[in-house]
Each structure stands twice: as C-alpha cells, then as structure tokens.
Image (cartoon, coloured by chain):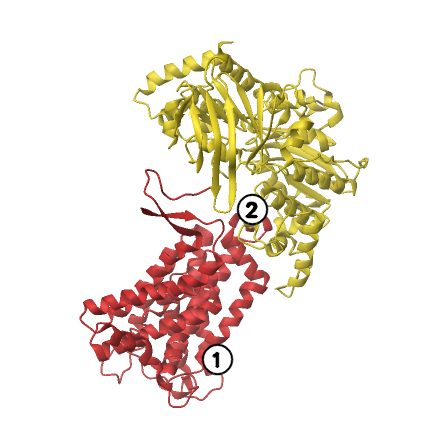
C-alpha cells in the first residue's frame, strides 16, 4: 500500500478555508511536541501561549495593539501578491515610515499644533511609499526582481535608523543610550481605551480591511491587479499596464507599512530606538498568506499572529522559554499551511503498491 | 496480400480510462492491420488523445487489453512502447531550438552511436523517404514543416511498425501535406501501420483506409473513408445533423477601417519573425483572410494591429482613419477595434475568473465602470446576454473560465468581442481546436458582423475556413504579406504555393506590384 497525490478536477473550495484550520491543528500538535522536548508541560504551555493573553481587557488591548502593524502591513503585501508583486520588504518601509514620521515629531513637537499628528502620519506614509518606490523603479526600468530589492532595502533602512539614533538624533540627555528623546505629548497618538496602551492607530488598521476588500473586489484597479497576477498575457491583451500595477502595488503596500511604522513609534514606543519592530514586516508575510491574501481573512490571521507574539512573551516570562520559540512556532504555522495547501489542488489516494504509481495528472 | 494471414499489428479491447468524474475512454476496441493507415476521428474531448497516450505508454488504462501482433502486452511507459515498435509524432514538437537536427535526434534516441554515425543514418532515411532534412542545421532556423520532418525521421530511425501522427497537417501547407501523405503511403506499403489523428475530413478521405470515430469517450462508428462522405463522417463525430453557415451579401467598397502602411518591424522575441514591408487595407463589410503556416509572422502582425506592440510611427497603423500606431490596446478599442486572440485561457480569458469578470476583461471601457467602481449588475447582464446569444454551455455567469470546454470558452470570447459592436474585428485562429458545432456558430457570427458593416480580419491556418468566409485572401510568409486576392479569383493551390514561399507563375499585375 502506498499514498499518492492525485490532481483534483478543480480546486476544492472547502479546502481553501479548511487548510488554515488544518495548519493550525498541525501547528498545535507540533508545538506540543516542541514543549515536551523542551521539558515543559505541553498543556500548561499551550494555555500560556493561546489562552492567558485573552483573559483580561489589558490583554485584549495588547492583542489589538500588536495586530495593528501586522494587519496594515499584511493587507498591503496581500494586495501586491494578488498582482504577483512580492513585497518582502514591508519591514524596511515600516522603518522608514517610522523615521520620517518620527523626524516630524522631533522637529515640530511641543507646540500643540493641530496639524502635527496628521503631518506625522502623512510623513510616515510618504516615507514608506518612497522606500517602496525604489524597487518599483528598479523593477519597471531594469527588471530587477522586487524580492531581492525590497529585502535588501530593509537592511539599508535598519542601518539608517541605527545611524540616526546613534548619531544626529541621539537624545543628549539619554545617558548615551542609542535612542531619540521622548516625543512630546502632542506627538503621541490618542489612547483609545483608558488604562491600556491601545491607540487610534488600530482604527486605521480596521478601516483598511473593508477598503482593501472594496479595492480588490469592486474597483477596476483591483480587477487590473488580479488580472496581472492571474494571467499576464490576458492583462496585456486587455490593455492593463503591468508597470502601472507594479507601481500602484508597491506604493500602496509601502504606504501602509509606513503608516504602521509611524503608528508604532507614535503609539506605545514614543521615541525612536534601534529596534522598533519585532519583525512585524516579515511576520506580516505569513499573516497575508495565512489570511488567503484576502483582507477579511487577514483580519483573523493578524489576530492569531498577535496572539503568538503575546503568548510568546508569556512563555518567556512564566516558562523561561527563549524568544526563538515564537519564531519557530511562526515558521511551523507557515510550513503546515503550505503543506495543507497542496490538498486544495490534490487529493490523497491510498493505493495498493504497484510499479508506476505517482502523481497522476491529466491534460 | 499476406497481411490477411498475419495477426493484427495492434488490437485494443475494452479500453477504459476514468479521470475523477470524467470517463475519458469507455470500452474502446480498435484493430489496426499491418500496413493499414487507420484514422482516429473525433471532436475535442472525444477521447482521442487519451487513447493515443495509452497506446504510447504515457497513460495506463484502468481496464482493457492491448495485444501487439497477437501477443497481450502492457505498456508501462513510452520506452516500452518504442521497444515494441510504436513511434509517435506529437502535435507540439519536442525539439531544442539551440541544438542541431542530429543532436536533437541523438537526444531523442538516447543512442550510443556518435553524431557522425547518426548523421549517415539520418541521410539514408531522408533519401529513402524523400524527407529532406539537414543534420547539421540548428533547429531554430527550420520551418515548422522541416521540424516535423525531423520528428518523423527521429521516429523512422527506430524502425517503427506503428507510427502515430497527431494532427500532423495543422502546421503544413497543402503541398507539404501532400508530401507527408506520400511518405505515409510509402511506409504503409512497406508494412508499417499508421494511426492518423485529424479532424480534417478531406485528408482522411484522401489517405486512410479505415476510420474509427469517437464521441464522448466511446467508439460510435467505423467506416471506410474512401466510401463515406465527409458529411456522414462529420455527423458521426457530432452525433447529429450538421448546421450550415450562411453569408449575408457583402458590402461593396466600404470605407477603410484598418490600414497598415509599409511597416517593417523587428521581432522582440527570440526566434520570432520580423515583419517585412507589410501593407494591408481592410474595408467596412469586408472579411479579409490571412493564410500562412504558423510562425511566419502571424503573432507579430496581430500584436502590431491590436496595440500590444507599438509601431515606430503613429501613421503605420490606422484604425477607422485615426493614426493609431502608437496607441495601446485600450485606446484602439475605444476607436472601435476588437480582438479575438489565439490563446483562449490565459490571454483571451482568465481561467481562475468567473465568466462575469471575463466579460469585463475587454468590455470595461464600454460603460461598465463608473468612478473606478465596477458596475456588477450591468456586467452580469452583459455576460448573461453573451451566454444566451451564443448558446454558451456554462453553469452560469459565476462559472470559472477553466470549467468551460474550449469551444464554449471561444464562443464566449467571440460574443464578448462582437458584443461591443466593433467596427473592426481581428480574429486569430477563431475556430482552432473548437468542435464543429461551435466552429460553425463562430464563423456565422463573423459573417453576420461583416454583413452588418464591420471589417473582419481573420488569421487562420485552416484554408477551408478562409475560403468559406473570406472576401479576399492574402498570405503571410516570412513576415511579408502578399497582396490580397478575391477569394473567387484564387485557389487552394495558388494560396498553398504562396504559403510555401513560392511566387505565382504568370502572376497577375497586382501580385507583381506587391513583390
């Protein structure tokens, strides 16, 4: 007896949504084994990871806070992915957004100007867009692949942030710590729920869900994006410019990542430091795929990923597990998702063993 | 003939193959005698290619028996088929462009002999059968007909006793096809059997001694094509009476709606064809047929007309009087140009999209978008109208492109392009690979559009089709377009000569002028 994969007549629609669930179940099993190997009681660890963070209002607020940058970055990444534009560098656009918006806060803060926060937000968006414009130009002009350019620019942006907080923007009263001075209170995003750190940035993220859905599903631009992604020759035939779509997607996803960046530093952080993101921009790639590149799906997957971050912190604090466990769990989730995705187009067949049984495909 | 006493070369009994929900082959039985040229007839999806793949060892049947020269065999893979003596020439060639003919053949044979030894053997075979091939030439220099000869030589080097030919003449000029038939008859007289797959009934009548007709995965009849009429065979294939297309009266001397003025353009693709000094004039109400063997610049010409490739000067292409050489597809569509491309899924339609979105693909400029938002109600109605008017078999407007058969997808695309009432329609191979019923409906739609006053340019390899619907016919060869001649004033032979690069003896003044 042996197992073989057989191509389905058409993709199984139920598997499109069941596959993330299977991936989650697979991850839970995998994570339990991991805990057991590390010498921790799996059930307790799972409780710390998945349940404990949700037990208090404060925990829920923290969840929304963590989900905000993930959601913003992931929606941009997902829209670009629909056009087969692979923006791997949301982390870099996030960083530049934070630098640009933070620069505005440092320059104009403390005057109680009504325009300060809007200007910071615009600067953050513009910074992210500008950073994404570089790969867009390189792709449309020189055919340089955006996977490489966006990723490489991420490291440039992190170096740039490091230079600023170690050098010209360093807080003179900061005891030589590599950080800027604290933003003035007028340069901080208003708190949404008193007593928590949750700020109005979460509203931008929530608004991005229906706007992203409308863009993809109801507008001609979204149709262009999907056509370029699904069938480039059909897009050419229809007269949809590939370069236009590449520019739009990179600017949009860069702008959203930049918005996430400024919200992060004008929210809980309140200053620029060398490390302003625990890898939100990269985790957002997993979030985007886990959410089926669909804004509504991403709403859920970003909450799940935020939970993993919070639970991961809990594991560090209460169970003395290293932070690398969080990364391992994220990786496991993506791995199981990709594996389960095979079942969308293939079914598993059990057959009596015979010489030439393999992947059956038909024309 | 001693063939009477020999066991049949190949006998299939009760061959059945099921793919998930579809029964591709159901209880198929077929017998091929030694030296027999046997036709396998059927529409797309009738199960011809599955059956052939089973014989060639690419696909294994679920049940049924295969007997080779009276001995039951199983054919697990193509190597086993070749060892038995089955050779196959595929519709799409598997040659490496950057290698020479001899190198390609050596690869296919997996031979132990040197290229030099092989070159000698290739020379022998090609002389013996009159198959002119040059072993040292690189494949990318070869015409499609020459490439096919390479494939045939590759098969013949293995001394096959059954040669399978899959739609071999779709890429040949009529004269080249005649040459191929001579080779096949020669093989047959030496005792090699031929299984000949085609939907061109006149060829089957000319060549084959026996025909097996498939429909819906079953054998629905057998006949002697030398006796049966084309009408009878066609009706067996489609399982009903054959509808007939009617041409309305053509307009006389309509206004020019599409012009190319002495355009030469280098190809932008490796191994593409350069366009050389092309001039073309299409008038309102006219159907202009462009004949030619594939790879002679059809793709490049259509790209230049549709706007997917821009011309160096605005004046090089005029659409409805407007200099459009540097306009993209959207701008040209606004001028009244519509285009039915060669590839259905992936170009003319998106496989993953529902029909309603596939309707939008080119109709978005015709009032289906307001303030950037798609008017789904209106486009849904448009898609429903297309489905109804062209009798597209689909599960509704939400059915995905990939769920439709080739013929139904093509009817939908034709409906979409005609539905915007274009003044000029470009149609590339509009009935290629489409079943007979759909092909007739599509030809009828093209003729109706012309009768209503639009100009229609049809690029096709199917000469019978061009002669049926065109008012004028021109030939594309090596990137140059001959001067169009009225269909009634030319013949398949003349057009065939031009397709092969010949010039007409005693050319008429206009042809001389064009050259």
Q: Is residue A169 above or below residue A74?
A: below
The quadrant in which the C terminus of chain B is found is: top right
Whether discs 1 and 2 lie on one chain: the answer is no
Q: Is residue B139 left or right of residue A158?
A: right
Residue A310, label in figure: none
Residue A129 appearing in the image: no
Badge 2 element: loop
Q: Is residue A38 above or below residue B380?
A: below
The residue that disc 2 covers is B347
Viewer-side residue, A358 vs B15: B15
Task: Please identify the quarter of the rendering in which residue A127 is found.
Answer: bottom left
Residue B385 appearing in the image: yes
Which chain letter matches label 2?
Answer: B
* Chain painted in yellow in the figure: B
Residue B14: percent from the left, percent from the top? 49, 32
Task: Please identify the quarter of the rendering in which residue A300 is found.
Answer: bottom left
Q: Please tell me which residue is depicted at 40% across the width and 81% down the height of the picture.
A: A105
Q: Colour of chain A?
A: red
Residue A87: percent from the left, percent from the top? 41, 60
Callout 2 crowding tier (Cα within 10 Å): few <14, some 14–19, many ≥20: many
Q: Is residue B266 left or right of residue B487?
A: left
Residue closest to the far bottom:
A194
Residue A118, label in figure: 1
Q: Is residue A25 above or below residue B475?
A: below
Badge 1 element: helix
Residue A328: percent from the left, percent from the top? 27, 65
Q: Please tell me which residue is depicted at 34% across the width and 44% down the height of the picture.
A: A352
Residue B462: percent from the left, percent from the top? 63, 30
């Amino acid at each position: 007896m042996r197992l073989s994969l057989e191509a389905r007549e058409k993709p199984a629609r139920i598997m499109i949504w069941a596959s993330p669930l299977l991936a989650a179940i697979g991850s839970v099993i995998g994570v339990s084994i991991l805990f057991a190997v590390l010498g921790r009681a799996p059930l307790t660890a799972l409780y710390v990871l998945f349940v404990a963070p949700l037990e208090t209002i404060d925990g829920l607020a923290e969840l929304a806070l963590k989900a905000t940058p993930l959601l913003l970055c992931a929606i941009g990444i997902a829209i670009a992915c629909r056009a087969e534009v692979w923006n791997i560098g949301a982390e870099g656009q996030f960083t530049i957004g934070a630098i640009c918006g933070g620069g505005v806060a440092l320059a104009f803060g403390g005057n109680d100007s009504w325009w300060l926060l809007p200007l910071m937000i615009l600067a953050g968006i513009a910074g992210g867009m500008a950073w994404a414009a570089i790969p867009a130009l390189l792709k449309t002009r020189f055919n340089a692949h955006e996977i490489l350019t966006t990723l490489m620019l991420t490291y440039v942006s992190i170096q740039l942030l490091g230079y600023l907080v170690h050098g010209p923007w360093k807080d003179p009263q900061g005891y030589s710590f590599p950080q800027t001075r604290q933003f003035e209170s007028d340069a901080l995003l208003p708190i949404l729920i008193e007593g928590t750190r949750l700020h109005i940035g979460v509203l931008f993220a929530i608004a991005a869900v229906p706007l992203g859905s409308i863009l993809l599903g109801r507008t001609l631009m979204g149709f262009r994006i999907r056509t370029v992604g699904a069938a480039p020759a059909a897009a050419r035939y229809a007269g949809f410019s590939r370069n236009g779509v590449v520019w739009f997607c990179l600017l949009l996803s860069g702008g959203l990542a930049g918005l996430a960046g400024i919200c992060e530093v004008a929210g809980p952080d309140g200053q620029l430091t060398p490390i302003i993101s625990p890898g939100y921009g990269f985790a957002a790639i997993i979030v985007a795929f886990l959410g089926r590149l669909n804004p509504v799906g991403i709403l859920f997957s970003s909450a799940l990923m935020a939970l993993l971050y919070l639970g991961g912190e809990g594991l560090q604090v209460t169970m003395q597990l290293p932070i690398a466990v969080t990364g391992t769990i994220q990786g496991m989730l993506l791995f199981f998702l990709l594996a389960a995705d095979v079942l969308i187009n293939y079914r598993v067949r059990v057959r009596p063993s015979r010489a030439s049984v393999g992947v059956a495909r038909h024309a | 003939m001693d063939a009477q006493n020999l066991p049949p070369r190949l006998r299939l009994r009760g061959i059945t193959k099921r793919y998930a929900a579809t029964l591709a082959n159901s209880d198929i039985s077929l017998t091929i005698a030694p030296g027999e040229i046997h036709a396998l007839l059927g529409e797309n999806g009738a199960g011809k290619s599955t059956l052939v793949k089973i014989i060639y060892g690419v696909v294994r049947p679920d049940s049924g028996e295969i007997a080779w020269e009276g001995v039951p065999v199983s054919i697990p893979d193509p190597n086993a088929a070749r060892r038995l003596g089955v050779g196959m020439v595929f519709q799409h060639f598997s040659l490496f462009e950057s290698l020479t003919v001899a190198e390609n053949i050596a690869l296919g044979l997996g031979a132990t002999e040197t290229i030099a030894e092989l070159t000698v053997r290739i020379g022998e075979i090609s002389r013996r059968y009159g198959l002119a091939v040059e072993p040292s030439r690189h494949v990318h220099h070869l015409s499609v007909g020459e490439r096919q000869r390479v494939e045939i030589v590759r098969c013949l080097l293995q001394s096959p006793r059954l040669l399978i030919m899959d739609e071999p003449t779709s890429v040949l000029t009529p004269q080249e096809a005649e040459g191929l038939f001579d080779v096949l008859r020669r093989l047959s007289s030496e005792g090699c059997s031929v299984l000949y797959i085609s939907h061109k009934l006149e060829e089957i009548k000319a060549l084959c001694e026996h025909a097996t007709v498939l429909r819906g995965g079953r054998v629905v009849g057998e006949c002697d094509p030398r006796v049966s009429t084309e009408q009878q065979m066609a009706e067996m294939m489609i399982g009903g009476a054959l509808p007939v297309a009617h041409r309305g009266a053509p307009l006389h001397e309509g206004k020019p709606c599409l012009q190319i003025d002495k355009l030469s353009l280098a190809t932008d693709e490796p191994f593409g064809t350069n366009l050389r000094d092309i001039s073309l004039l299409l008038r309102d109400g006219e159907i202009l047929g462009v004949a030619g063997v594939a790879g002679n610049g059809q793709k490049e010409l259509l790209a230049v007309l549709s706007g997917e490739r821009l011309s160096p000067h605005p004046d090089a292409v005029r659409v409805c009087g407007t200099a459009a050489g540097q306009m993209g597809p959207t701008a040209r569509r606004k001028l009244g140009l519509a285009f039915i491309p060669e590839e259905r899924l992936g170009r003319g339609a998106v496989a993953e999209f529902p029909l309603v979105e596939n309707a939008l693909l080119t109709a978005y400029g015709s009032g289906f978008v307001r303030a950037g938002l798609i008017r789904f109600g209106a486009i849904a109605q448009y898609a429903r109208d297309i489905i109804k008017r062209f009798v597209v078999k689909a599960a509704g407007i939400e059915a995905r492109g990939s769920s439709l058969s080739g013929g139904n997808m093509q009817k939908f695309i034709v409906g979409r392009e005609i539905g915007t009432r274009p003044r000029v329609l470009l149609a590339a191979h509009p009935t290629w690979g489409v079943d007979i019923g759909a092909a007739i409906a599509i030809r009828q739609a093209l003729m109706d559009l012309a009768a209503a006053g639009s100009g229609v340019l049809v690029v096709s390899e199917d000469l019978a089709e061009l002669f049926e619907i065109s008012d004028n016919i021109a030939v594309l060869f090596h990137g140059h377009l001959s001067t169009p001649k009225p269909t009634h004033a030319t013949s398949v032979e003349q057009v065939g000569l031009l397709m092969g690069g010949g010039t007409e003896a005693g050319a008429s003044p206009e042809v001389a002028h064009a050259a």
